[in-house]
Image (spheres, rainbow, N blue to C red):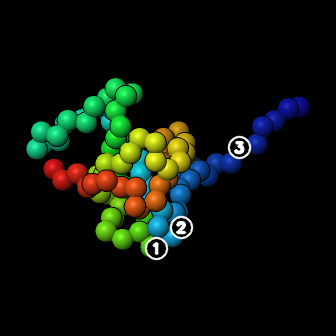
Amino acid sequence: MDSVLEDPRPTRLSLEPLDDFVVVEYAEEEAETRAGLILPANLEAQCRSGIVTAVGSEAEGVSPGDKVLFPKDAGYDVRLAGTAQKVLKREHLIARILD
């Protein structure tokens, strides 16, 4: 008799960045803020946007929930629980996007 054991508890994975690292979940590929800033969807774009989901203890000036702009090639790409995220140093964040 073959049986597969499954853990009935839901898996809730999250990243806790260390030092001055931040975790950013990618925003939609193309977005326009209420102020009219258009963030391009093409792959040639040099910047990406996302929502900060976690900050390290030394990452100053940014909080979870902030929408930020960062260079496309900065940091490390991570896929966690099916969600694309970026782990990067605080100094690589270019700007906070205010709606």
The residue at the far left in this view is 35
The residue under label 3 is 6
Residue 29 point in image, percent of width and height: 33, 32
The residue under label 2 is 18
Point 43% across, 64% down: residue: 55
Q: Quadrant of the N terminus?
A: top right
The residue under label 1 is 57
Point 35% across, 61% down: residue: 64
What's the mark number on residue 94? none
Could one spot residue 54 in this view of the protein? no
In front: label 3 or label 1: 1
Point 41% across, 41% down: residue: 72
Label whose residue precedes the other's in the sequence (2 or 1) = 2
In front: label 3 or label 2: 2
- Look at the numbered discs 3 and 1 and tell me whether their residues touch, using CB distance below 8 Å: no
The residues bearing labels 3 and 2 have C-alpha atoms spaced at a distance of: 32 Å
The residues bearing labels 3 and 1 have C-alpha atoms spaced at a distance of: 36 Å
For mark 1, does the 10 Å Cα neighbourhood hold few (<14), some (14 to 19), or many (20 or more) residues?
few
- Look at the numbered discs 2 and 1 and tell me whether their residues touch, using CB distance below 8 Å: yes
Residue 26 point in image, percent of width and height: 39, 42
Type of the residue with mark 2: Leu
Could one spot residue 58 in this view of the protein? yes
Type of the residue with mark 1: Ser
